[in-house]
Amino acid sequence: MPSTSRYHAFPALRPGDPVAVIAPSSPFDRASFEAGLAIISRRYQVHYDPGVLRRRRYLAGSDERRLSELKSALGDAGARAIFCARGGYGMMRLLPALEGIAVVPKPVIGFSDITVLHQLLQRQRLVSIHGPVLTQLSRLDAGAHARLFELLESKAPAAALIGAETYVAGVAEGPLLGGNLSVLTRLLGTPFLAPLDGAILLLEDVGERPYRLDRMWTHLALAGVFRRVRGIVLGELVGCEDKDADYSSADVLRELAAATALPCAAGFPIGHGAQNQPLPLGVRVRLDAGSCRLTFLEAAAG
């Protein structure tokens, strides 16, 4: 299996740097948005357009508004980082207009629907941050905030993360790529999926019943993804159980993981749960599935 070449670290931030806030996906609750703003405003100079508060059905305003805001933030050399307000849905609608866009290297922070944006950056070999959206920040503890700021500002590799269960023992190394399972599978068969060859694949999800997890996992298998990656890191699966079933989502995924024969560990504090520890995508990692340990071998910032 070919090794994926190195991804480019982003310039390290410093306290007081200007950062942008964008809403490329769904609308959000204003109170949680302002609570998140308060947290990052104590560290950085935060700039955002009032248009982030717009609503159009299930989107944070029109495609034109969100696209203009996103293009401006990605190309703005003055904005040292981009914080996404919320996931939900909407980024996929913008992809055709983003093909070939020149991106100023900088950390983009978000998860869930922001997996689409991470994939866009990974196609350009840029490191980004799978981490809390702004509206989630106030529900996380101070440790998650400190880890996020450390990722953005330190030139040392991130601290290791520990999972809860071994599905398939083994050790594998490669760049950490992926994100939300539902979103990632929607990119299969499109030109917008980043190359996954040699990667350690991160997957997490919310609100998907076990048979849906099976269907999406099988879609990845049929598309040859598990023949290209070297290991699997499973984050949290929140609200993914069938009521009164005699099996769990973990039972289903444990069997599916075993069929791949790839090192796989589950239960990492990543995703839609109460912790959502931020971590860099694109940096080289070592997964020791037997000890449920994910070690970061490179810094996200340079």
Image: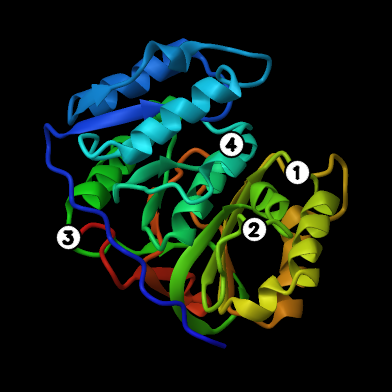
Query: Residue drawn 26% across and 51% down?
Result: 151
How many C-alpha atoms fall within 10 Å of the one at disc 1: few (<14), some, or many (≥20)?
A: some
Task: Write down the quadrant of residue 194 in the picture.
Answer: bottom right
Marker disc for residue 155: 3
Amino acid type for the residue under numbered disc 3: Lys
Q: Which residue is mark 2?
A: 191
Q: Earlier in the sequence, mark 1 or mark 3?
A: 3
**Place of residue 66 in the rendered image (x, y in percent of width and height, measured from the top left):** 51, 25
269 sits to left or right of 301:
right
The quadrant of the picture occupied by the C terminus is bottom left
Task: Write down the quadrant of residue 253 in the picture.
Answer: bottom right
Q: Which residue is mark 1?
A: 208
Marks 1 and 4, how far apart in space?
A: 24 Å
Amino acid type for the residue under numbered disc 4: Leu
Q: Earlier in the sequence, mark 3 or mark 4?
A: 4
Q: Which residue is mark 4?
A: 94
Q: Are marks 3 and 4 in contact (CB under 8 Å)?
A: no
Q: Are marks 2 and 1 in contact (CB under 8 Å)?
A: no
How many C-alpha atoms fall within 10 Å of the one at disc 4: few (<14), some, or many (≥20)?
A: some
Marker disc for residue 195: none
Q: Nearer the viewer, residue 272 or 200?
A: 200
